[in-house]
Structures are given as structure tokens and as C-alpha cells.
Amino acid sequence: MANHKSALKRIRSNEAKRVRNKYQHKTTRNAIRKFRELTDKKEAEAMLPSIFGMLDKLAKRNIIHKNKAANLKSGLKVQASKM
């Protein structure tokens, strides 16, 4: 157990950040999953910018690595162009 007031606060803030990061990451993964199920090119093209924004935000906050975000964006763009 933590012995200092600041350590207790750090535990609380870490938990809050963990939950927030988990929510944002899961939301992005679900959006990607929905995108991969699409068959309509116009709908896919409309969805891409929002997913790209989500991935950029996750990478900026170090929730995922910047190269992983780039790889996901590239793969999604390729999939959209093949529809």
C-alpha cells in the first residue's frame, strides 16, 4: 500500500487514465472492425477521415505506437481503394 499522499493520488490518476485509454482504444478498434465489414465504397470513403483522426489521436497520446497507426491507416486506405 502507498505511504504518501502523492502516491495515493498517482494511483487514482493512473487508474482514471487507464480506463480512458482503454475506452478510446476499444472505440477505435470497433470503428476499424465496422469499416472492414463495409462493402460500399462511398460509405467507406466517408468513414476513413474519422478513423484516421482516432488513430492519430491514439498515436499522439502514446496509446499505440506511431508506426502501428501508420500501418493501420495504410491498410485501411488500400482496402478502401480496392472496393
Image: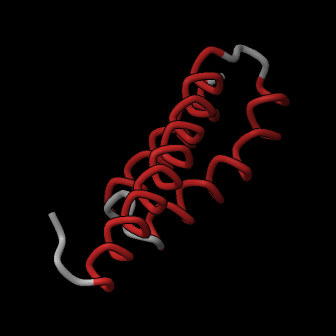
* Residue 63 falls in image quadrant: bottom left
Counting labels gives 0
Residue at 49% x, 45% y: name it: 25
Residue at 41% x, 65% y: name it: 12
Residue 65: x and y in percent read 31, 62
Q: Nearer the viewer, residue 12 or 59?
A: 12
| Snapshot colouring | secondary structure
Q: Nearer the viewer, residue 23 or 15?
A: 15
Residue 23: x and y in percent read 54, 44
Q: Is residue 29 above or below residue 38?
A: below
Looking at the image, residue 8 sits to the left or right of residue 83; the answer is left
Q: Is residue 80 above or below residue 13?
A: above
Q: Nearer the viewer, residue 36 or 5?
A: 5
* Residue 66 falls in image quadrant: bottom left
Looking at the image, residue 56 sits to the left or right of residue 44; the answer is left
Q: Is residue 71 above or below residue 45?
A: below
Residue at 63% x, 35% y: name it: 81
Looking at the image, residue 17 sits to the left or right of residue 66; the answer is right
Residue 21: x and y in percent read 47, 54
Image quadrant containing the N terminus: bottom left
Residue at 32% x, 85% y: name it: 6
Residue 80: x and y in percent read 63, 33
Q: Is residue 16 above or below residue 32?
A: below
Image quadrant containing the C terminus: top right
